[in-house]
Amino acid sequence: DDQSQPIARAIRDLGIEGLLGAAFAVLVVLAFLLSMRMTLATAMSIPLALLIACIGLRVGGQSLNVVTLAGLVVAVGRVVHVSAVVVENIKRRVEAGEHKFAGIPAAVREVAGSITISTLATAVVFAPLAAISGRVGDLFRPFAFAVVVASLASLLVALMIVPVFCFWLLD
């Protein structure tokens, strides 16, 4: 009995649902920021953070499967959240008249602590799932690992890459 077709279909469907979720999240950011350029800075963080997370999965000995893909899809919300917080603060400071050379680093410093705490809280909540033993643990361990790695990747991108995107995209 060949199970490869249903598994491949499940992975494809989960990928499509993840893309739809990311697209809707970007639309929400656009509605909130009312700026196509700043929304683009947030949107660019999604594939970059997920790429870093996939590298982290590989380094951690995990494969990309239905369970880890589900963890990455769940983490897309975190990716958008931390990037949107950084982008919104940069936008606010620059619109208030600060030059982007001073405003962008100041804006990032202003929110770095809160988004770091928020991200670490997410990691701490999901980390105990890795300690579950037996078959249930075999299911939840890769999921938890994917969420934690993607959350940490989102923090890295939000603090280091998104400000560069904003610098390039601001007038």
Image (spheres, rainbow, N blue to C red):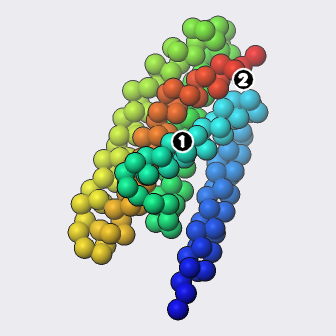
Q: Residues within 10 Å of mark 1 (few under 14, many from 20)?
A: many
Which structural element holds mark 1?
Answer: helix
Residue highlighted by disc 1? 49
Q: Residue 151, percent across and down? A: 44, 44
The residue under label 2 is which amino acid type? Leu
**Residue 146 left/right relative to 16:** left
| Mark closest to the chain's N terminus, 1 or 2 | 1
Residue 169's disc is: 2
The answer to the question of whether label 1 and label 2 lie on touching residues, with beta carbons closer than 8 A, is: no
Residue 95 lies in what quarter of the image?
top right
Q: Is residue 104 above or below residue 9?
A: above
**Residue depicted at 71% across the width and 35% down the height:** 40
Residue 131's disc is: none
**Residue depicted at 71% across the width and 46% down the height:** 27
Which structural element holds mark 2?
Answer: helix
Q: Residue 125, percent across and down? A: 32, 51
Please say whether residue 33 is visible from this viewpoint.
no
**Residue 115 left/right relative to 98:** left
The residue under label 1 is which amino acid type? Ala
Calculate the distance from the C-alpha at mark 1 to the C-alpha at mark 2. Answer: 19 Å
